[in-house]
Image (cartoon, grey):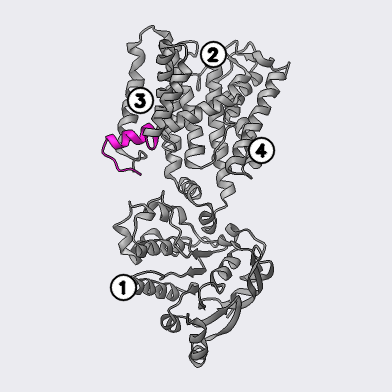
């Protein structure tokens, strides 16, 4: 059974990853664009994790960037300053620790829902923002720096050099692919069906014998630790972390990207991130007031496209509206 | 025979309005029991109190000898109770197949007497509709799916609230046929319905609820003996 749910998704995913694989060959030496794509792919991972939470689980959060920032901070705090650590080992640490934090946070925030959950997640994210912004130990507003990038050897084999932009790009692309497959497998599992059911009607799911709190908590922990992974990649790419990664507008922008792409579609997160960042890039070059035009354009897109860009692609490819 | 369910003096309120005034009855293991009464008399509330969806203010629910009155709903269901709610409760974002997938589990003893294929054998209509969303089905198909979904949790006690309400006579007949099959498989069943004739033939025990009180309980013979009183209580 295919994990891809419709024709447009299939076409998009095949095309995206095929182009993604070969694009560095055409951009030979143009590190600006390779870096730009890496950044957007990292963002897409972050947006995807948020999309699962908001679009599938029905938990609306404005504090998801807290985990994005934490991912970066956990790495820079844990790793020794002048020693190359192993990338995969630290991936495990970052996700484990952020998952544990998400478990604690989830136990608190998941007792609420709707507007209350939005407010409490926002409050917690702002708290951690100010914690890091005011801490002398963690660099305050300037944050912390990554002086030496990790090495990526597995059992002595080393394919990737993270100092190399193209290599780093491929690592990001691979991460995005894994993340996508991971969410699609979850969505198609019985766990995913229960998640869908409880989003639609929590009482009914309870009456079928499911503790919806447990299911929401698991989804929250998974999505949060993937957001942290994206933050970890961000820290590696730019060589620093600072509190602005956790700021509420990062969460809000990601939410806009998820909406633009098509909430709950998962692959829509990729479309949303690329479309948003693409528009941003072009409009920024046209006018100083890019935010004004960008805002107007997004309002127009969200109003005209039902189910976002993914829904639009689905209609184009002749699929039924779901 | 042992009691699978004992309900003692349930008093349930929705806000200020007092719905159940001390409902008590018991159900023996393997028994099929009907709960009758006019609309608004507290039949559904009785079921919801048993399941913890509308927790009673006082009284107790004893299931297989264990007091489950204070347990959360999902834990009660995990003790092998299944509930087919009034209105069927379909998920509009899940297909028929996904509905069955998400519900399927072994019972607390690790047995799976009902499998996906068996449910489709009982409801062949659903086989043709596997990729349709739950809300794209006809009323009868929705009801079949709701019952199929409940069976896949492999329950010892099945609670059906108005399973044949609003269905065409032929479909009704089909549903009653399946309920008969479930009864024969040994599952204890509680049925809320208005069709006295079928209930009389199908159930071993009957409970009549009027204004939140049990006004009659007995077997089919005593139901016949009290026919006049019961018909009077059910007449609109």
Q: Quadrant of residue A77?
A: top right
Mark 1 chain = B
Discs 4 and 2 carry the same chain letter: yes
The image shows a total of numbered marks equal to 4
Q: Quadrant of residue A166?
A: top left
**Magenta run includes residue B138:** no
Secondary element at tag 4: helix
Q: Position of residue B9 (x, y in %)?
A: 67, 75
Secondary element at tag 1: helix
Pick whichever of labels 2 and 3 is earlier in the sequence: 3
Say whether residue A107 is left or right of residue A229.
right
Mark 2 neighbour class, 10 Å CA radius: few under 14, some 14 to 19, many 20 or more? few
Mark 4 neighbour class, 10 Å CA radius: few under 14, some 14 to 19, many 20 or more? few
Residue at the disc numbered 2: A238
Q: Position of residue A315 (x, y in %)?
A: 30, 37
**Label drawn at residue A164:** none
Residue at the disc numbered 3: A17
Cα separation between marks 2 and 1: 69 Å
Q: Can I make out residue B175 in this image?
A: yes
Mark 3 neighbour class, 10 Å CA radius: few under 14, some 14 to 19, many 20 or more? some
Magenta part of the protein: which range? A305-322
Mark 4 chain = A
Residue at the disc numbered 4: A104
Cα separation between marks 4 and 1: 54 Å
Residue at the disc numbered 1: B170
Cα separation between marks 3 and 4: 36 Å
- Residue drawn at the location 50% of the way across and 28% of the way down: A254
Q: Nearer the viewer, residue A99 or A271?
A: A271
Cα separation between marks 2 and 3: 24 Å
Pick whichever of labels 3 and 4 is earlier in the sequence: 3
- Residue drawn at the location 63% of the way across and 77% of the way down: B24
Mark 2 chain = A
């Amino acid at each position: 059974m295919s994990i891809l749910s419709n024709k447009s998704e299939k076409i998009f995913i095949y095309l995206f990853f095929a182009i993604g694989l070969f694009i560095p060959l055409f951009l030979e030496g143009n590190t600006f664009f390779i870096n730009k794509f890496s950044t957007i792919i990292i963002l897409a991972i972050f947006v995807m994790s948020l999309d699962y939470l908001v679009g599938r689980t029905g938990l609306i959060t404005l504090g998801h960037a807290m985990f994005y920032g934490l991912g970066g901070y956990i790495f820079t705090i844990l790793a020794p300053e002048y020693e190359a650590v192993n990338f995969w080992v630290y991936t495990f640490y970052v996700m484990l620790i952020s998952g544990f934090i998400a478990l604690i946070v989830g136990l608190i925030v998941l007792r609420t829902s709707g507007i209350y959950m939005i407010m409490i997640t926002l409050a917690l994210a702002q708290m951690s923002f100010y914690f890091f912004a005011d801490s002398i130990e963690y660099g305050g507003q300037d944050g912390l720096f990554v002086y030496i990038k990790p090495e990526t050897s597995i059992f002595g084999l080393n394919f990737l050099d993270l100092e190399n932009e193209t290599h780093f790009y491929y690592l990001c692309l691979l991460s995005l692919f894994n993340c996508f497959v991971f969410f699609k497998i979850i969505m198609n599992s019985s766990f995913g069906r229960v998640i869908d059911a409880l989003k639609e009607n929590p009482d009914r799911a309870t009456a079928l014998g499911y503790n919806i709190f447990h299911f929401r908590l698991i989804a929250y922990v998974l999505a949060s630790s993937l957001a942290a992974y994206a933050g970890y990649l961000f820290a590696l790419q730019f060589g620093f972390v600072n509190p602005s990664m956790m700021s509420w507008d990062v969460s809000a922008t990601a939410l806009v990207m998820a909406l633009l792409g098509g909430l709950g579609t998962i692959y829509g997160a990729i479309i949303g991130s690329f479309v948003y960042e693409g528009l941003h890039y072009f409009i920024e070059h046209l006018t100083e007031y890019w935010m004004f035009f960008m805002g107007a354009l997004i309002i127009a897109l969200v109003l005209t496209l039902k189910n976002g860009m993914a829904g639009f692609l689905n209609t184009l490819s002749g699929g039924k509206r779901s | 025979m042992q009691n699978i369910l004992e309900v003692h003096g349930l008093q349930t309120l929705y806000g200020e309005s007092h719905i159940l005034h001390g409902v008590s009855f018991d159900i023996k293991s393997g028994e099929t029991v009907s709960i009758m009464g006019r609309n608004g008399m507290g039949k559904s509330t009785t079921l919801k109190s048993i399941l913890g969806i509308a927790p009673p203010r006082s009284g107790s629910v004893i299931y297989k000898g264990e007091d489950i009155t204070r347990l959360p709903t999902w834990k009660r269901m995990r003790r092998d109770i299944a509930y087919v709610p009034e209105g069927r409760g379909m998920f509009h974002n899940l297909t028929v197949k996904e509905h069955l997938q998400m519900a399927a589990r072994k019972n607390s003893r690790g047995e799976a007497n009902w499998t996906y294929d068996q449910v489709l054998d009982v409801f062949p209509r659903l086989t043709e509709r596997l990729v349709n969303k739950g809300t794209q089905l006809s009323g009868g198909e929705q009801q079949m799916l709701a019952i199929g979904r409940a069976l896949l949790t492999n329950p010892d006690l099945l609670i059906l609230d108005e399973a044949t309400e609003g269905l065409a006579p032929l479909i009704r007949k089909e549903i009653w046929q399946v309920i008969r099959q479930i009864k024969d498989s040994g599952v204890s069943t509680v049925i809320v319905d208005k069709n006295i004739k079928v209930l009389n033939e199908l159930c071993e025990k009957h409970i009549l609820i009027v204004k939140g009180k049990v006004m009659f309980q007995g077997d089919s013979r005593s139901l016949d003996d009290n026919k006049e009183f019961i018909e009077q209580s059910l007449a609109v």
